[in-house]
Image: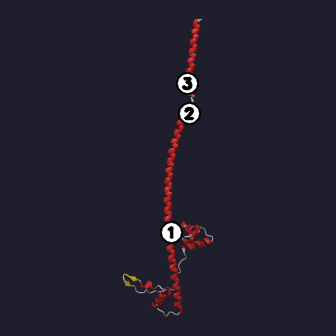
Amino acid sequence: MSVAATLLFILICINVILWFVFLARFRKIFSTDEIIARTQNHLNAMLKDINVNASRNLELLEDKIRQVKSVAAETERKIEELKVGLKNASEVRAVEKKLSEGLKKTRSEHRGEGHSENNATLTSRYEKNFQQKELFSEKADGQDASPVRISYAENLIVPKKDFADRVREYKEKGYQPDAIARELECSVQEVRLVLEFGI
């Protein structure tokens, strides 16, 4: 009986030891601390990747913003140049119009009196009508310039209408910007600039 009790005691001890080993391994395999640590590591890696991608995307966006700003500045400069060019062109057209009106007036006076007046008389009349004697008496290279002799063509050249006026005329007739560009033989962008900004 003592041998049986000893064997029973040894079996109970082995059983208890095996249970401790099993519980230790079970706890190690299914431990929440280890799962939490692994999850944290994965999350940290994901956050690092997201940060790297976000910083790269921000750099790309800043680069694109710089490009857009430079294009916008260039566009503004071009628009200012176009405005100055159109203003100068309209001033030139106004001068051409005044000269054309003066030539018509002088020609009508010339026709009314018959063709007896010579070019020198027409030149002096032209000077009186427009009070532009300073044009003919300007000094060139320190010397008095001689009066300009004006000869007249049979058919007067009628100056073209202002580009912006012609665009607006076609728009009032119901033309689309691309049709206006075809009619005026210019680019659609020029037509849109005139229509949008009224340049």
Depicted 63 relative to depicted 162: above or below: above
Confirm whether residue 142 shows in the render.
yes
Q: Which mark is residue 25?
A: 3
Q: Which mark is residue 173?
A: none
C-alpha gap between disc 2 and disc 1: 67 Å
What residue is shown with label 2? 36
Instruction: Give the SS element for disc 1.
Output: helix
Task: Estimate the x, y position of residue 25 in percent, counting from the top left.
Answer: 55, 24
Question: Of marks 3 and 1, which one's residue comes earlier in the chain?
Answer: 3
User: Can you give x and y, in whole percent of width and height, for residue 105 in the image?
Assistant: 53, 87
Residue 82, labelled with which disc?
Answer: 1
**Residue at position x 58%, y 20% from top?**
19
Residue at the far top: name it.
1
Question: Secondary structure beneath disc 2?
Answer: helix
Picture residue at 57% right of the left edge, 13% below the top: 11
Residue 155 makes an appearance in the image: no
Of circles 2 and 1, the one toward us is 2
Secondary element under disc 3, as helix, strand or loop, is helix
* Comes first in the chain, label 2 or label 1: 2
In this picture the colour scheme is secondary structure
Q: What residue type is labelled 3?
A: Arg
As shown in the figure, which amino acid type bears the numbered disc 2? Ile
